[in-house]
Amino acid sequence: MVTLRLFDRDRQPPDWTEIIRPGQYVAFSKTIDTGGPCNQDGRPFPSPDDVTCLIFDGLAEARAFCEEQVTRAPAVRFEIFDSAGRREPPLLVVVHPSRIATLEGNPGGIRVRKWWAWTLIVGAVPLFWYDYQHDKGMLIFPTVLGINMVIIAARLMQLNGAYVHAERLRQKRLAEHSTAVSNH
């Protein structure tokens, strides 16, 4: 593992993206609560010029280090990228097990959004029925409310679909990296 400042005018090359080689992995640490950059122990950097990243020679090494580190500093979140850097979403996001619910697209959040979406759809049906049965659709308010409930439900389902799709892509990229490592 190498700790490297993101940008150093005195270094040749000055930018970390020109230093990392194919087959290496980079980990960035953030505080979970604020999302601000921090060191591996969870302490914020004194200035933006001091921000660092961690470069590893292998994905397993990066994962093991980050998993061990979050047990010591539960408020830290590590994002692990391949040598292409931040062009793609992270291959892995490592957080303390007690903080998994804070991740976007976590399974618990998906279940809750799905439950709310179906609840909204089921709740819209009686509104449509009520408006139709009373004054043959002339009340308007129940129908407008029902339509909005269906739209919100559709948006929740779309959000879940986006998270599931992003996770599939991440799993595919991770499998490609794992296969590449085993072929060498």
Image (tube, rainbow, N blue to C red):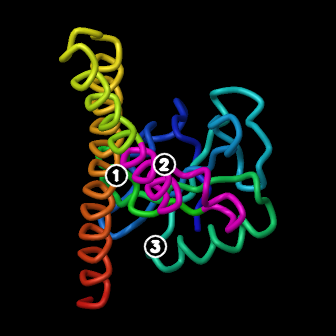
In the displayed structure, would residue 177 be above or below residue 163?
Answer: below
Which residue is at 32% across, 27% downward? 130
Q: Can you tell which mark lies on residue 163?
A: 1
Give the SS element for disc 1. helix
Q: Tell which circle, 1 or 3, labels the residue nearer the N-terminal end.
A: 3
Q: Name the residue: 80% across, 44% down.
A: 43
The residue wearing badge 2 is 104
Q: Amino acid at mark 3?
A: Asp
Q: Is residue 110 magenta?
A: yes
Q: Between residue 170 and residue 153, name the one nearer to us.
A: 153
Provide residue 5's location: percent of width, then percent of height: 58, 43
Q: Earlier in the sequence, mark 3 or mark 2?
A: 3
Given residues 72 and 140, the one toward you in this image is: 140
Q: Which SS does the magenta portion mostly show?
A: helix
The crowd level at tag 1 (other Cα within 10 Å; few <14, some 14-19, many 20+) is some
- Which of the labelled discs sits on residue 57, or is there none? 3
Compared across the picture, whether 99 is left or right of 156 comes to right
Q: CA distance from mark 1 to mark 3?
A: 29 Å
Residue numbers of the magenta segment: 95-119
- Quarter in which the N terminus is drawn: bottom right
Q: Earlier in the sequence, mark 1 or mark 2?
A: 2
Mark 3 falls on what kind of element?
loop
